[in-house]
Image: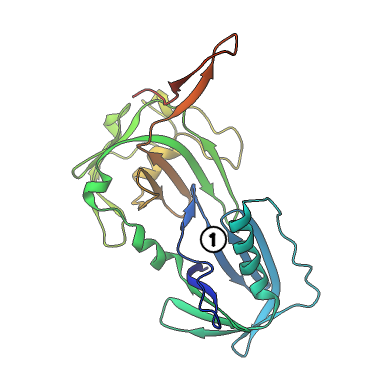
Amino acid sequence: MYWPGERLRGRERGQRRAGGGRRSAGSQRAAYADFSERGVGLRMECNYSGRAGTIRDGKFIASEADDGAQTVMSCGRERDAREGRFFSFFDKDATIERIGPDRLLLRSGATELILERPAVRRLQYVPTPAELEGRWRLLEVTHYMPGGGYSGIGLSEVPGRVVVSGDRLSYSRCPQFGLTFRVGPDGRLEKTGGTAPPAAPADCRELAEPAPGRELPSQWDVLRLLHDNPLVEKKGEDALLISTERFGLLVTKAPCQTQEQSNDHRTTRVVDCASSE
């Protein structure tokens, strides 16, 4: 699995066309090229695509039978153009060259694409201890399913905050399940102490609502995730993604504001829609 690392560019013009940008969108990866024995699965922020093919003799050989099916959500002129360049890159046989243990250089015609492993790419987004500190509002929890699928539920209406203070992490409504941790070099919150929550909800009614479906996560998975030595990475200036292989928790410090209209529709006001502390 790879993330478009630095550039997708035409060598003749030397023009930067894709790369940089966000590593993730919500609790999922914003862009990737996932290779398998059947071909390559693709995403670039908005849409999904793929190309059937095989890797042989240092090349990705595209299958002539592939119809190049993809989602077609419009994401704005600039993003649509970038997606088109990324998705069409694999239509022609591309050469593949390893340029280090975690990077690949692909060439197709006059275009180059550099891919970097997600585990390495994410290191650029590891927060400092100071950036971890604070009270974080719950946004959503996602279940990453085997085979690449995912499902999630919103948490914006769930009260309480994830609190990080020094080496202590807790959920404010159920501090009895708090823990101490140290931050590993890969941004992992390595647990050093604290009482793990039981497998099923107990003594914490705020997170006791059951999962709304069999494949969906539950609110209780928030506590289980925090105790499972999760990785943490920055999501912009005021959000974090806390994740394991099974679950991802998105939290933020950003205010939750919405516009509320009067009954006669003559005036509007901004109201705080955040869950309570």
- The residue pinned by badge 1 equals 31
Residue 103, compared with residue 71, is above or below; it is below
Q: Position of residue 121 (x, y in %)?
A: 41, 65
Left or right of 121? Residue 112 is right
- Local crowd size for mark 1, using a 10 Å CA cut-off: few (<14), some (14–19), many (≥20): many
Q: Residue at x 60, y 83 (%)?
A: 110
Element at badge 1?
A: strand
Q: Residue at x 45, y 77 (%)?
A: 103
Residue 267, compared with residue 70, is above or below; it is above
Residue 51, quarter of the rendered image: bottom right
Residue 7, compared with residue 75, is above or below; it is below
Q: Does residue 209 show up?
A: yes
Q: Residue at x 75, y 62 (%)?
A: 69
The amino acid sitting under disc 1 is: Ala
Left or right of 222? Residue 180 is left
Quadrant assignment for the C terminus? top left
Q: Position of residue 77 (x, y in %)?
A: 63, 55
Q: Position of residue 126 (x, y in %)?
A: 32, 57
Left or right of 4? Residue 131 is left
Residue 253, compared with residue 247, is above or below; it is above
